[in-house]
Image: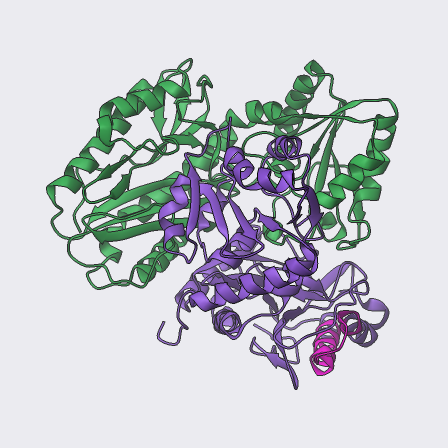
Chain colours: A green, B purple
Amino acid sequence: MSDAPEQGFPVAEYAARTARAQALMAAQELSGLLLTTEAEVRYFSGFHTLFWQSPTRPWFLFLPAEGKPIAIIPEIGAPLMRRCWIEDIRTWPAPRPQDDGLGLLTDILAPLAAQGARVGLPKGPETHLRMPLGDFETLLARLSGLDIVDATGILRSLRMVKSDTEIAKIAHICAIGSRAFARVPALARDGQPLEALFREFRQEALAQGADDVPYLVGGAGQGGYGDVISPPTRKPLRKGDILMLDTGATWDGYFCDFNRNYAVGTPDAAARRAYAALWRATEAAIAAVRPGVPCRELQEVMQAELGPQGSTVGRFGHGLGMQLTEWPSIAGFDETVLQENMVLTLEPSLVHGAGHVMVHEENIVVRAGGAELLTERAAPELPVI
Amino acid sequence: MSDAPEQGFPVAEYAARTARAQALMAAQELSGLLLTTEAEVRYFSGFHTLFWQSPTRPWFLFLPAEGKPIAIIPEIGAPLMRRCWIEDIRTWPAPRPQDDGLGLLTDILAPLAAQGARVGLPKGPETHLRMPLGDFETLLARLSGLDIVDATGILRSLRMVKSDTEIAKIAHICAIGSRAFARVPALARDGQPLEALFREFRQEALAQGADDVPYLVGGAGQGGYGDVISPPTRKPLRKGDILMLDTGATWDGYFCDFNRNYAVGTPDAAARRAYAALWRATEAAIAAVRPGVPCRELQEVMQAELGPQGSTVGRFGHGLGMQLTEWPSIAGFDETVLQENMVLTLEPSLVHGAGHVMVHEENIVVRAGGAELLTERAAPELPVI
């Protein structure tokens, strides 16, 4: 793909992320930060592999108060980690159920426990601990002096604001996704099983330059579809269907996340109105985006446009980057204030007709002057195929 | 795909899984089992969606001592869950950080806590708790009377042995993977960037009928490759390279997991010998498979064939099914005894030449009479392209 950005990041980016984390850690008097999930480990190390698909082995990254992160990882990952900027790489021959990294973690944490030091661990919304809970309990029992506190805020504030290099990757995959969606009218046909269309869409996204299409959901049904997270069935597309595909494709470890709606044959008035309302709600949110605006306000702007049809389930968008969905939420509860270089999805949804749902989604980056679209803006009227 | 099995499972399969779990729960005097991960929830409910890619929302399934499982899930999943066999579906408008399902879980668990009941939770190897740790701590504080014990053994013993319907799905995706690998000599060419070949392989696997290719790793290098979990680089293939692709493709939620090695041009003697040794080791393991044999013994059989070159890192295979890797491990520490209808990968690896690694992998199902290959057996000599 000749227009593709460079793969990876300069070492300076990892150094800057680590320095910013350490500044926030210092403000909370943290002696370290223990990370266990794919995105957390990759964010600070550059360690990028699909091997996380295997649930067998735990992986750990420890950010000390000063200096580079320390990798505590299965031996199988050492060659790849050595090509990252990390220097201190400690390995064990995982899987080894009697000690899957606990001894190595204890080496690092026991001296801190002896001082009664404070160590951060993400414990808050949208995080989880990716290691066996029993092993974590064993570790806690060994390190009773350690003061373990929630460090979600540190990761959240860092990861919500993207670097130029990150934005370039997201913009690239959004452009790939836009080109793939533009091909849907040529791929979809009356009588085609939905699962066949999904398969062809995946192939098209790859042909357009995606590395992978980890997320592809949607639906089709007469007058509308019933939910927005289902895998495709073998049911054939037919005239009168409203079709929706929602994709999270990736390039170099970064996601797009947006969808497109189509009518198979002439749509009924309810579906046309629903689509137009969602398009206007998204337009209003795009116009409302600027640094300083709280996420809650974007939700309100969209809800005002949709009126009582507006879905009250969940949220109307979210952050986007290394994961399909990231902090913040475009939701009434989220007072997070927009900052320059946040990447967001705007995703209003509503209920129409006989219990149908419809969702519309675009991806934007917050710039000083307002929203910059990363996706090719959907047509203002429901496209007919 | 005309040769594809039916999608999904008959309700009887979920009822049988639940009944088997409840029998094991009764033996341990468990009043319930709390599950939080994709595979666990899907195994007992049939709830199948890629939406788990989003880390935002927790999902819970509670297996009571008797009766059907109870789903405690975000409202966005209710339409899909209602199409499963589950009847008791309790939802909340997630994300809702101040109460992401905790109130609903408390409704179920508080009466059990009041009785000092015992509830199982997977805490052991290859498991994790997919909910914010802080929320789990809050729940524990509310339910101090509850005796929470590790239930890994129950899930492990159930999921290791596959039903005929599960085996048919795995066999189907293994056949798709085999057809895709057979096309690699036609897809690969001198000068082709490795990432382009990976992209074409993904498209080929989809064309052959895969739903998705969530896992594709490998490498290429002069005389051999350096690790077995890396994503592809843009480095062009060239004569003298040893190329390896390892794929976990899926069909209807079930994985294959195997790889193939190729020489680009005439390989050197070390690579040829390494390949032949791995092929023989796999052949020896295939011959050794039968019900009653401990997993450890398969590791020993392969190690004996490989001699001192044999890799001592990790393991020489593992279980396979809803996840890319599952219990058991083909490893010295694993005394699990093979049973009929276990599905396994046999995956010996060794070190050769100047620090190169080589791995070879096949998928089999344990039958009364021995191993039945699910993958088309690799050629006994290193294929040249």
Residue farthest along the bottom direction in this orientation: B369
The answer to whether A225 is drawn above or below residue B158 in the figure is: above
Of residue A16 and residue A130, the one placed in the foreground of this image is A130
- Residue at left offset 48%, top offset 41%: B54
Magenta span includes B277: yes
Of residue A272 and residue B185, the one placed in the foreground of this image is A272
Of residue B81 and residue A295, the one placed in the foreground of this image is B81
- Residue at left offset 59%, top offset 65%: B20
Magenta span includes A342: no
**Span shown in magenta:** B273-298
Residue B167 position within the rendered picture, expressed as x and y whole percent measured from the top left: 53, 73
Residue A116 position within the rendered picture, expressed as x and y whole percent measured from the top left: 83, 22
Q: Main secondary structure of the magenta part?
A: helix
Residue A206, visible in the rendered structure: yes
Q: How many marks on residues?
A: 0
- Residue at left offset 69%, top offset 44%: B148
Residue B235 position within the rendered picture, expressed as x and y whole percent measured from the top left: 58, 52
Residue B190, visible in the rendered structure: no
Residue farthest along the front direction in this orientation: B115
Q: In the shown orientation, is residue A266 left or right of residue A55?
A: left
Residue A363 position within the rendered picture, expressed as x and y whole percent measured from the top left: 37, 33
- Residue at left offset 17%, top offset 37%: A381
The answer to whether A237 is drawn above or below residue B140 in the figure is: below
